[in-house]
Image: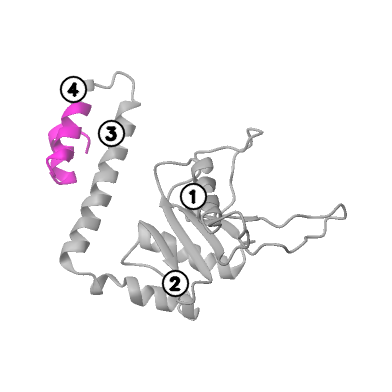
């Protein structure tokens, strides 16, 4: 889900986007800059009254390479808007920043600072292992987050919608995998999509289409 929040004193804005389908970095930057530029109401008031923190959470490994063609393999990337002088010293003019977090275990590293790894572990657990997760509950922020998102406290309707959403994405992966096989049958793929739209369970769809 996407989350937009504002502190009670109106001094801080945070936007969190969970991405598992569209890795368009230009779009992320657009949203982030919009939150900043919208604070300027007229030509006589250029001062930013709120600090903006953008957080983009990737649920899958990066599908996007750098401009020079090199792959991205970092679990944490931080974009700071402050300029540097010719000596390389940072000049602190702005408080805005943007953070990219990839929860995929493919990019886990022992070099990742604990304060980031704790949240990466939480993100991975909430996406991949919502039941059997192991987290650093000594981190007060993590403990509070776990208490808020505890599955036992989610109402049945919301939980069912979450399961249906994950079920749909899992079946879409099967379709994508099958479509890449040599000689894949278009009618089988079409039938699978129709089954998804009808809300059939994964196991039944797999049996009907021979994907299991």
Q: Earlier in the sequence, mark 3 or mark 2?
A: 2
| Residues marked 1 and 4 touching at CB (< 8 Å) | no
Q: 165 left or right of 72?
A: left
Tell me if residue 6 comes above or below residue 68 in the rendering.
below
What secondary structure prevails in the magenta region? helix
Q: CA distance from mark 2 to mark 4?
A: 44 Å
Binning the other alpha carbons within 10 Å of mark 3 as few (below 14), some (14 to 19) or many (20 upward) gives some
Q: Earlier in the sequence, mark 3 or mark 4?
A: 3
x%, y% of residue 12? Answer: 52, 69
Q: Which residue is mark 4?
A: 187
Q: Is residue 100 above or below residue 189?
A: below
Residue sitting nearer the eye, 198 or 174: 198
Name the foreground residue: 155 vs 106.
Answer: 155
Screen quadrant of the C terminus: top left
Inspect this view and state whether residue 182 appears.
yes
Give the labeled residue for mark 3.
175
Q: In the image, which residues are magenta?
A: 189-212
Choose mark 3 or mark 1, whichever is in front: 1
- Label 1's element? helix
Badge 1 is on which residue? 31
Q: For label 2, count other residues whose C-alpha is less than 10 Å away and answer few (under 14), some (14-19) or many (20+).
A: some
**The N terminus lies in quadrant:** bottom left
User: Label 2: which residue?
Assistant: 135
Quadrant hosting residue 66: top right
The kind of secondary structure element at disc 4 is: helix
């Amino acid at each position: 889900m996407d989350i937009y929040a504002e502190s009670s004193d109106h001094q801080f804005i945070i936007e969190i986007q969970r991405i598992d389908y569209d890795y368009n970095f230009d779009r992320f930057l657009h949203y982030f800059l919009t939150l900043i530029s919208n604070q300027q109401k007229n030509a006589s008031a250029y001062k930013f009254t709120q600090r903006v923190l953008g957080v983009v959470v990737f649920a899958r490994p990066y599908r996007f390479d750098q401009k020079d063609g090199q792959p991205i393999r970092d679990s944490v990337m931080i974009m700071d808007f402050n300029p540097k002088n010719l000596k390389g010293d940072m000049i602190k003019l702005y408080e805005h920043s943007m953070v990219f977090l990839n929860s995929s275990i493919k990019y886990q590293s022992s070099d990742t600072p604990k304060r980031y790894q704790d949240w990466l572990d939480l993100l991975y657990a909430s996406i991949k292992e919502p039941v059997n997760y192991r987290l650093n509950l000594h981190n007060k922020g993590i403990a509070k987050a776990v208490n808020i998102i505890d599955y036992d406290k989610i109402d049945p309707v919301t939980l069912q919608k979450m399961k249906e959403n994950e079920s749909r994405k899992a079946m879409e992966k099967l379709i994508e995998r099958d479509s890449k096989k040599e000689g894949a049958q278009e009618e089988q793929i079409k039938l699978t999509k129709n089954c998804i739209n009808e809300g059939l369970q994964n196991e039944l769809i797999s049996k009907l289409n021979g994907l299991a």
